[in-house]
Image: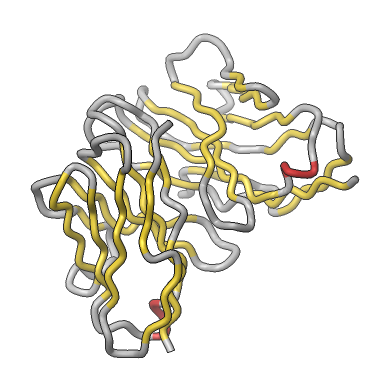
Amino acid sequence: AQKITQTQPGMFVQEKEAVTLDCTYDTSDPSYGLFWYKQPSSGEMIFLIYQGSYDQQNATEGRYSLNFQKARKSANLVISASQLGDSAMYFCAMREGPSGGYQKVTFGTGTKLQVIP
Amino acid sequence: GAVVSQHPSWVICKSGTSVKIECRSLDFQATTMFWYRQFPKQSLMLMATSNEGSKATYEQGVEKDKFLINHASLTLSTLTVTSAHPEDSSFYICSAVRGRSSYEQYFGPGTRLTVT
């Protein structure tokens, strides 16, 4: 079974609009963390946001927010006020187990976001 | 910020030769580094976990004799692709974890390997 599922291979959004990128996960570990990374065409993986399984509040970082619904095992990324520079591949990822020590992370298949002027 | 570098950024080699890729954490110590492989338009696949001073832990299906990993210091891990073949052509990305209790991985810019 896939640990991380991103069902949207590609998305379009109008500049200045908000967009939600979907991510669902599967784990039986009570302690885990969810990440979102951006990969522009240059290839570098850029960390965007992190949500721990025990975090009470949804994570936010500037224009990025993570809509964490634990019971549904979903961790959608919301990008507000899209900019042309947001066009990239976006990967959802998960680490399982408590922080510290082994930090193996599993990545989803990614969503290609294109922002339209 | 935490910076991870990779060298070379791209390399072309002939079949049968070996290629070494370096991953360095420039401004922090990394007890754990990871090596990923990414085929075009696909996700990152973890190849191995590199721990300083010990043998690397390889993921299932990854040939340890073909992909040699050495983590000789807290700031350097190397991946050597031995006897490279065209099917080894890929984008190789390393990441480093700062400290022992951090959840954050800092990624290098990647190395594009083309085997002719």
Q: Is residue A97 above or below residue B37?
A: above
Q: Is residue A113 left or right of residue B115?
A: right
Which residue is farthest front?
B27
Q: Is residue A68 above or below residue B80?
A: above
Q: Is residue B77 left or right of residue A95?
A: left
Q: Residue at x 23, y 54 (%)?
A: B77
Q: Residue at x 47, y 37 (%)?
A: A26
| Count of number-bearing discs | 0
Q: Is residue A64 left or right of residue A93?
A: right
**Residue B83 position in % (x across, y down):** 25, 84
Q: Is residue B15 left or right of residue B30?
A: right
Q: Quadrant of residue B92?
A: bottom left
**Residue B67 position in % (x across, y down):** 25, 69
Q: Quadrant of residue B75?
A: top left
Which residue is farthest top?
A56
Q: Is residue A47 above or below residue B13?
A: above
**Residue B20 position in % (x across, y down):** 27, 70
Q: In which quadrant of the rendered image does the C terminus of chain A lie?
A: top right
**Residue B113 position in % (x across, y down):** 42, 73
Q: Residue at x 28, y 66 (%)?
A: B62
